[in-house]
Amino acid sequence: MRQSENGKYFSFKKSILVWITLIVVVIGVEIPGFAQNSSPTESNSALPLKFSHYSSKNGLPQNSVLAILQDNTGFIWMGTDDGLARFDGYQFQVFRHQPGNTTTIHNNVIRAIITDPLGHIWIGTEGGGISIFDPKNESFHNLSTLSPLLTELSSAKVSSLLIDDQNRIWVGTNGNGLFKISLDFSNLSSIESYGNNLIVHNYGKSSSGLLDDKIWNVYQDKSDNLWVGTLEGGVYTLSLSQNEVKKQDLTKNGIPVSSVKSFYEDQQGNFWIGSEKQGLFYRAKGQQVFQPYILPEKRKDFQQEELNITSIREDLQGQLWIGTLGRGLFIIQPLTKEIFHFEDDPSDPYSLNGNSVYTQFRDRAGNFWLGMYSGEGLNKVSPSQQQFEHFRYDPDLQKGLS
């Protein structure tokens, strides 16, 4: 009797599975885990994002925004080609170098910003090394003056800053290689005390496996690896547990990729690489080999040799935001493989204000800040509100953005 009941139950389950399969075929539902491989497609419908512009009341110190950060108190910091700006939600406060004043920022060209566990802001400058901002007294300290170990950074062109999950500071430079600065922040109370409690290690041509001293970007993945993108030498990884540098094989059509600007590991564990001239690359979770990310024929321009990918980020919905120099912003929906493209359209008052996205930052509220290059200012977008805000430089205003 029990065998008969089990047989009926198995038959019932089988019938249900048959009906589910038929329904999936008819309505085209894709069940997770059974998705077939398919190529990305450009969406026929526009992603509902609206751009709004502010061009008459602006307080950015300069139009090329190269670095963005949100500090522990919620302020948004922007580094530009001519000064540092702090935004409180209402206006900008601008900080610039003042000759003869050692408490001001060391250089006005800013390409990287991070905050350390004590709430101090590290600012990487072009030719002036690193300045550290103390929010308590609103003054700057030149990092290289704190210890003789940091002399080599005094006039370095800092291109990238990263604080890893062990609170070590990684400094990528254009010409001086990669530096690791180890500090025990638990025993520190002020910036002045940093110099007495640090260890510095330089990864350069003569001291490591890096074959290029010109660093574009430094990124830490979820497996405790550091990814280093260089200007001419391709991609390297540094195992943080073994302190071992390895050259990564990244090619397109048999041609090695030499200049790499951006990395990102998404929520699903897939890894993305953006190159300066050879497009976007993708490695699925669990795989070892990177492949060019193939886009629909209508968007062939996205994979042309001149495509310059500067930044890759992910929003709260799992969509990837791809910033480029000269080709605007792309948003990729990994599940549907739809691609949305935003470019400056002079005939559309709500379009993106410029086509050169140099950097992106997602704040704690989920807002995206897009730093534009070539005099195109700053964009802020709240995806939940489907609206972009733009801030552009107004030479008639001396300070403050209202």
Image (cartoon, grey):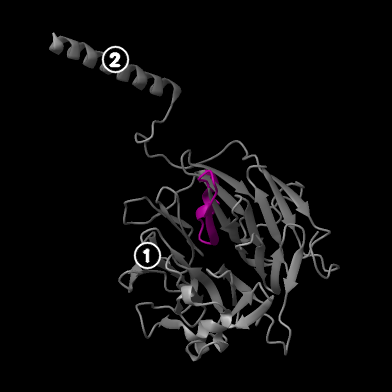
* Residue depicted at x 48% and y 41%: 337
Task: Kindly state the secondary structure of the residue where label 2 is placed.
Answer: helix
**Disc with the residue nearer the chain's start (1 vs 2):** 2
| Residue 67 visible in the displayed image | yes
Q: Who's the residue at 15% across and 10% down the image?
A: 4
Task: Please name the amino acid that badge 1 sits on.
Answer: Asn
For label 1, the crowd category at 10 Å Cα-Cα, with few meaning under 14, some 14 to 19 and many 20 or more, is: many
Helix, strand, or loop for circle 1?
A: strand
Magenta stretch, residue numbers? 298-319
What type is the residue that disc 2 sits on?
Answer: Ser
- Rate crowding at label 2 as few (under 14), some (14 to 19) or many (20 or more) other CA atoms within 10 Å: few
Asked whether residue 60 appears in the rendered view, the answer is no
The image shows residue 398 at horizontal and vertical percentages of 83, 70
Q: How many marks?
A: 2
Residue at mark 2: 15
Q: Is residue 119 above or below residue 357?
A: below
Check the picture and name the quadrant holding the N terminus.
top left
Closest to the observer, 205 or 250: 205
Give the residue at the far top of this rendering: 1
* Residue depicted at 79% across the width and 55% down the height: 54
Locate residue 376, reporting x and y percent.
71, 62
Is residue 221 on the magenta stretch? Answer: no
| Percent coordinates x, y for residue 85 in the rendering | 70, 68
Taking the image as shown, residue 323 lies to the left or right of residue 381, namely left
Seen from the viewer's position, the closer of residues 175 and 313 is 313
Q: Residue at x 19, y 11 (%)?
A: 5
Which residue position holds label 1? 225
For the C terminus, the quadrant is bottom right
